[in-house]
Amino acid sequence: MAKTNIKMWMDKGTALLKDQAIPNPRFEAEVLLDGILHKGRAWLYAHGDALLSEAQEKQYQVWLQRRSLHEPFAVIVGYKEFMGITFKVTPDVLIPRPDTECVVESALALPLEKKAKVLDLCTGTGAIGIALGVLKPDWQITLSDISPQALKVAEGNAGLNHVKTRIVNSDLLDAFEKEDPFDLIISNPPYIPHGEILKLEPDVKDYEPWLALDGGETGFDFYNRLIPQAQSQLKKEGWLVLECGADQAEALIEKVERSGFESGTIIKDLSGKNRGITAKKQRI
């Protein structure tokens, strides 16, 4: 009996994922298989007649079953690309998303000193801070999170990408009260209203940590604490950069201005939606 080759497995995987209403089932079937073979999707098509080993076949079947239950691809394969950088992912952290890249790019465009002191708050995988460290090697990067498990992931990702960072376990800025202030505080905090989480896609609500999603009743619990704290932990003319939901940006601008920041600017993502804000601390 002929064995099943790569093309047949991709076809089987596509059909299974399609039956379970997984978006882009062909693409997902391909990237799951490439997550095992590490050859690139183009290689899969060029070598469609190639056979998998028995161990590879079993692993692919397990991964297809997990994905059919809407477990995120990044958790299954254990990594995710962000800003062209590879990050390890576990169930303890929020999966880095392309939408956040515009927030990082906004931070990179700020007029900061060469050796700027930077804090990535609610760091999760460390994606934001580590990406900044890769692209600005002279910046002094601190990664902080309330979750010790998340910090272990972030620390591993810093090592993976050869970025020197400081790791601090903290509930927002509580652990930094006696420290010298930062040039930049950047954060993608939990901002989804509690009542909205159960309405999210199964990939998110069933598998990603609610600790990284739940922004309280209105979604502003963390912003309401963080913005006043940032006033005292930023240098004069230091910068605050926050990711937010599309419908939260204007209210965030009002909050930072009422807290003594200069006029904030809304960050737009590639689709033109509001994705975050930047705000500069006043000199006086």
Image: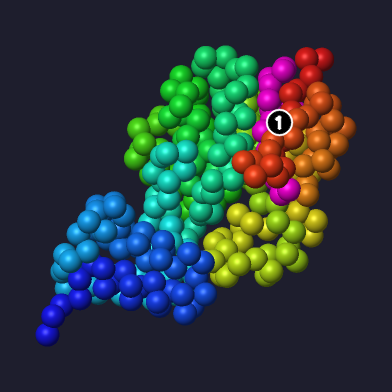
Q: What residue type is labelled 1?
A: Thr
| Magenta-drawn stretch contains 231 | yes
The reply, left or right, for residue 233 in relation to residue 104 is right
Quadrant occupied by the N terminus: bottom left
Which element is circle 1 on? strand
Q: Residue at x 43, y 53 (%)?
A: 89
Which residue position holds label 1? 278
| Magenta-drawn stretch contains 193 | no
Q: Position of residue 140 (x, y in %)?
A: 50, 24
Question: Start and end of the magenta stretch?
Answer: 230-246
Q: Which residue is drawn at 46% across and 75% down?
A: 18
Q: Which residue is drawn at 35% across and 62% down?
A: 30
Nearer to the camera, 51 or 207:
51
Q: Residue at x 52, y 14 (%)?
A: 114
Nearer to the camera, 169 or 117:
117
Location of residue 112 (image quadrant): top right
